[in-house]
Amino acid sequence: MKRTILAMAAALVAAFAVADDAPKAKRGRPKGRNPSGGIVEKAYAGNVIRAFNAQAVIPADKVAALTLQMRYETIVPFETVGAKPMTFAEAENAAGGFVGKDKVGAAVVIVNDPSKSDFYRASPEGRWAVLNVSPLKADNPAQERLEERFAKVYWHAVVRALGGGYAAVKPSVMTPFSDLKSLDAIPTTKPSPDVVNMLIDTGSLYGIRTITIASYRTACRNGWAPPPTNDVQRTIWNQVHQIPDKPITIEFDPKKDK
């Protein structure tokens, strides 16, 4: 339960920090008042779940944005890197070699192989999965629908790579599907709390620990904020680290006798 609360709190931190920096309506709080400075992450040195993007059907920036969203919403260290194009079979042969190197605790290789009808294939023992984009576009969907399908199968590949299964709590992206129709029928692209807990518990066995995120202002107050990178963050940094002009004095209060 504690793990779920932590993940939900992280998602709320991300949502409120973004909202805090967004322009406010005229009748709301004045724009620029106590901005959060955006979301920052505490330095992390553990293992990660790394996606190797070896296709171009889903734009790289979309894959990166989705991966970052997964990272912040679950506080599980997801990340993605580019890889040379490869077939499904080549990805299966390569995936096991990625695990255990360069802090990779689990790997997902994303390919586009029209010769294969598999949406994905996973090896929980090897801690890897191969995701195939090709069958997701079999009926020539609009790009938005294609990216939604990808997000759902991406989650399935990640969860299966760590030995997870279907969700007990609904709604959840980890709902059974067997074809595009049943995939489209899954009502969400988000994992349920039990799925997040599984990722945290199982990931910890392989050195995949949870990350710490907060607004820049909170990170400054807690003493781990990275150096500022923009004017808002510099202002916050200076406010939090400013040395008082006057020394702190303690005056005797006769009424309290102290």
Image (tube, grey):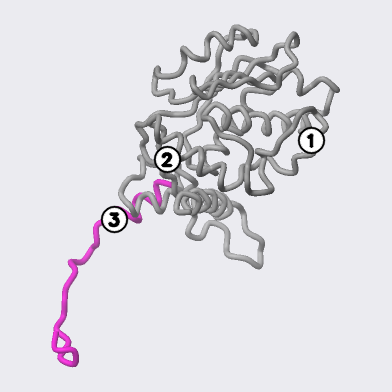
Q: Distance between the Cα atoms at labels 3 and 2?
A: 31 Å
Q: Earlier in the sequence, mark 3 or mark 2?
A: 2
Q: Nearer the viewer, residue 238 or 224?
A: 224
Q: Which of marks 1 and 2 is nearer the N terminus?
A: 1
Q: Nearer the viewer, mark 1 or mark 3?
A: 1
Q: Do the residues labelled 1 and 2 touch (CB within 8 Å)?
A: no
Disc 1: which residue: 184
- Asked where in the image residue 154 lies, by quadrant, the reply is top right
Secondary structure beneath disc 3? loop
For the magenta stretch, what is the residue range? Answer: 233-258
Disc 3: which residue: 242
Q: Going by the image, does 245 lie left or right of 99?
A: left
Residue 76 vs 95, above or below: the answer is: below
Q: Which amino acid does label 3 sit on?
A: Gln
Q: Does the magenta-highlighted stretch encompass residue 59?
A: no
Disc 2: which residue: 210
Q: Earlier in the sequence, mark 1 or mark 3?
A: 1
Residue 126 vs 164, above or below: the answer is: above
